[in-house]
Amino acid sequence: MSSTASGKSGTWRNWGGNVVSRPAREVTPASVDELAEAVRRAAEDGLTVKAVGTGHSFTSIAATDGVLIRPHLLTGIRDIDREAMTVTVEAGTPLKRLNLALAREGLSLTNMGDIMEQTVSGATSTGTHGTGRESASIAAQIRGLELVTADGSVLTCSEKENPDVFAAARIGLGALGVITAITFAVEPLFLLTAREEPMPFDKVLADFDELWAENEHFEFYWFPHTGNTSTKRNNRSAGPRRPVGRLAGWFEDEFLSNGVFQAAQWVGRAVPATVPAIAQVSSRALSARGYTDIPYKVFTSPRRVRFVEMEYAVPREAVTGTLRELRAMIERSPLRISFPVEVRTAPADDITLSTASGRDSAYVAVHMAKGAPYRGYFTAAERIFTAHEGRPHWGKIHTRDAEYFAGVYPRFGEFTALRDRLDPDRRFQNDYLRRVLGQ
């Protein structure tokens, strides 16, 4: 262990504040060799191992009472291959730093989620995604992986090398090993034109198939207790670049989307009866706007209001029915929901436990402010999602178990068999994996 690897232990908390764990020790390896040594030492001491990024998952997927590995010294770009159009990055690299570094090199990922605080390994291992007609999750853009397995050996995989591991480990839930590096497919930097505009909820649902088909990236937010949505369409553009003005950007992205929104959360929690009225006002506050910029400036936005979230992928053709049921449930209930419901899509992919594995999918995400009592709302929403054979996001709150997953993932057994082979002693086990993957 080098002087940079620390062995101190303490309390670990996730970003949403809903998960707390006390690891026996923390290690901050500065190289792949140090990480492999930490895994071997954990085995000698009979301890389990978990790597944790920025803690943006709302599930206890990263919680451990064993060895907590923090990968933040394993950052930076290892290699850019302009012939193959790939970039290899260390696992602890934050998406924000990757996006900036790629832009400087005139490169970009094809698609991304709406926040970029997470590490590349944390984001991909839990299936983080944006929205796209043809372009899928961040993990679907992976072309190669390097991971330290349970016996401390380093395994590389791709479509050609260890393809069975590659099929599963791109969204591996931390169950197959600790990722040390990821090779992504990239493309020359391009421009996107974003069109944001309000649209009635019923119109969005009636026109959903058209809106999806006509746009490379379509998403919308519906404000419960109202008939209002805010839609966003991102499409490639020949330019010129016309970014959001500094003042307008601050006003809409910081003041309205974060500042006023935070105040609305406080008022809504203090006086729940005011929530529908606040929702009417906030759903009308964001006016239509258009801008053209490089991808990460269009796809991502700051999220300063802390929240907890549940998100399910349903078959794309089931999304309008799912949303109508969600609206009816909220209207029938005494619930007062001050956070918008987010709706996105993804094409089918070939990753074993991807929420879009083998089927075109639509995502419905429900949120509550950090510290608010979310169980009643999430339980009722989950009942609707599971009736449509929904698959929950691995990093967001849900109550499903291995028995359920075996029914909604045709290749579930393939993943658990690979885990038996790579981690027979369950070195990477924790309570969450015990529930979702079984013993």
Image (cartoon, rainbow, N blue to C red):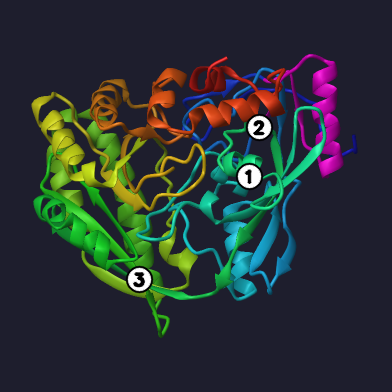
Query: Which amino acid is tagged 2?
Result: Leu
Real-space Cα distance between discs 1 and 2? 11 Å
Residues 141 and 233: in front is 141
Instruction: Describe the element under mark 2 as helix, strand or loop.
Output: loop
Residue 314 spot, x, y in % from top left: 30, 39
Instruction: Describe the element under mark 3 as helix, strand or loop.
Output: strand
Mark 2 and mark 3 residues within 8 Å of each other at the beta carbon: no
Graded by Cα atoms within 10 Å as few (under 14), some (14 to 19) or many (20 or more), the crowding at tag 3 reads some
Residue 116 spot, x, y in % from top left: 52, 53
Residues shaded magenta: 23-50
Mark 1 and mark 2 residues within 8 Å of each other at the beta carbon: no
Q: Is residue 114 left or right of residue 5?
A: left
Q: Quadrant of residue 32?
A: top right
Real-space Cα distance between discs 2 and 3? 36 Å
Residue beneath disc 1: 166
Residue beneath disc 3: 235
Q: Please, is residue 150 above or below residue 136 in the view? A: above
Numbered disc in front, either 3 or 1 = 1
Q: Residue at x 80, y 36 (%)?
A: 35
Residue beneath disc 2: 176
**Quadrant location, the N terminus:** top right
Q: Quadrant of residue 164?
A: top right
Q: Residue at x 89, y 38 (%)?
A: 3
Residues 74 and 167: in front is 167
